[in-house]
Image: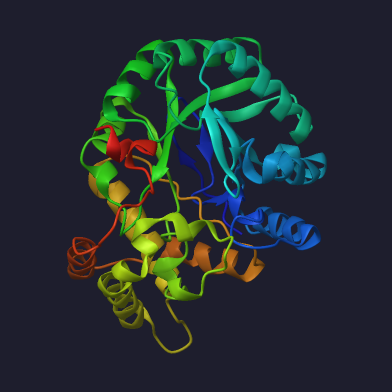
Amino acid sequence: MTAATVQLGDGLSVSPLGFGGMALTPVYGEVDPAEALATLHHAVDAGITFLDTADIYGGGSNEELIGRLLKERRGEVQLATKFALVGTPSTGYSDIRGDAAYVRQAIDRSLQRLGTDTIDLYYMHRRDLRVPIGETVEAMAELVKAGKVKHLGLSEVTAEELREAHSVHPIAAVQSEWSIWSRDVERQVVPAAAELGVGFVPYSPLGRGFLTGTVDASKLGSNDFRRNIPRFAETAMDANQAVVAAVRDVAAELSSPGRAATPAQVALAWLLAQGGKLGLPVVPIPGTRKADRIDENLGALALELTPAQLARLDAAADAVVGSRSADPNWVSQGRE
């Protein structure tokens, strides 16, 4: 169990790794609710106390699942959830709403599903371009005053959007995709966060499983969310296997008798090293359905990559083919 904490922005302290709750929904296939709850309990037992969910994961069922854990362990965890998307990851989204009325409506629904009075970190999940971001953040700030929320976060915003939002109310964290094969945020968003004292919470830090070397894109299920992502297309796979090969090679170099480093640990250790290099706190939130993967991921905290290994991984990342999103405007990359 790890007792260390990392401070994001606005005084929010969390565990060095978080847990991404979307993995415990049908987005990658069917889920056993009892096993999912056991996985959550194991995460907290192991020292991962920063739990991330959203109102649209499983159509609200993921918040309800985490609510079952909170009944017993609310005081042990830092809870993050999100609003703004209308729909589900599996069936698609019909709208994005950042208007004040929706903010007030969404928080009450989330609090009810989670069975708690307060959210530690409340994110705007995606940008509603019809509403000035300052207006959305003003509505979120009212939730802080009301005691329903402790800290504010933003997901997939540009550097300009982050600066505007931060001028209205302190932003504790930006959550966007960031990994060895998704580095576009390093151009503008990460430097802005470092400048403003905002923490960064990378989602999909293992490349939606691809960087672990265990995903065969040609065998994904028909309802697997990844089928919609260009870099998982068969035409991109051969080129993108090069980054997996580099991660595997580094893992082999770091392995010794009695201790095997894994590709997942290398990918997470690379992200943590990037945070140190770029001057901001970074807390990845890998998700999994299996308890043993949680223990594996935590092993990344003790892994140290050499400058030569970091350079080799950086070079492999430059060869990645295909967008990280079916619609680049959906994420910050398309609006920078």
x 35%, y 77%: residue? 251
In the image, is 67 to the left or to the right of 122?
right
Where residue 75 sits, quadrant-wise, is top right
x 47%, y 16%: residue? 137
State the residue in front, 104 or 292. Answer: 104
Where residue 257 sits, quadrant-wise, is bottom left
x 49%, y 67%: residue? 299
- In the image, residue 224 sits, relative to residue 252, either above or below, namely above
x 53%, y 24%: residue? 151
Quarter of the picture containing the C terminus is: top left
- Name the residue furthest bottom: 257
Q: Residue 29: x, y in percent?
A: 64, 63
- In the image, residue 307 sits, relative to residue 169, either above or below, namely below
State the residue in front, 274 or 30. Answer: 30
Q: Is residue 48 visible?
A: no
State the residue in front, 213 or 40. Answer: 213
- In the image, residue 151 sits, relative to residue 240, either above or below, namely above
Q: Is residue 230 visible?
A: yes
Q: Residue 273: x, y in percent?
A: 30, 55
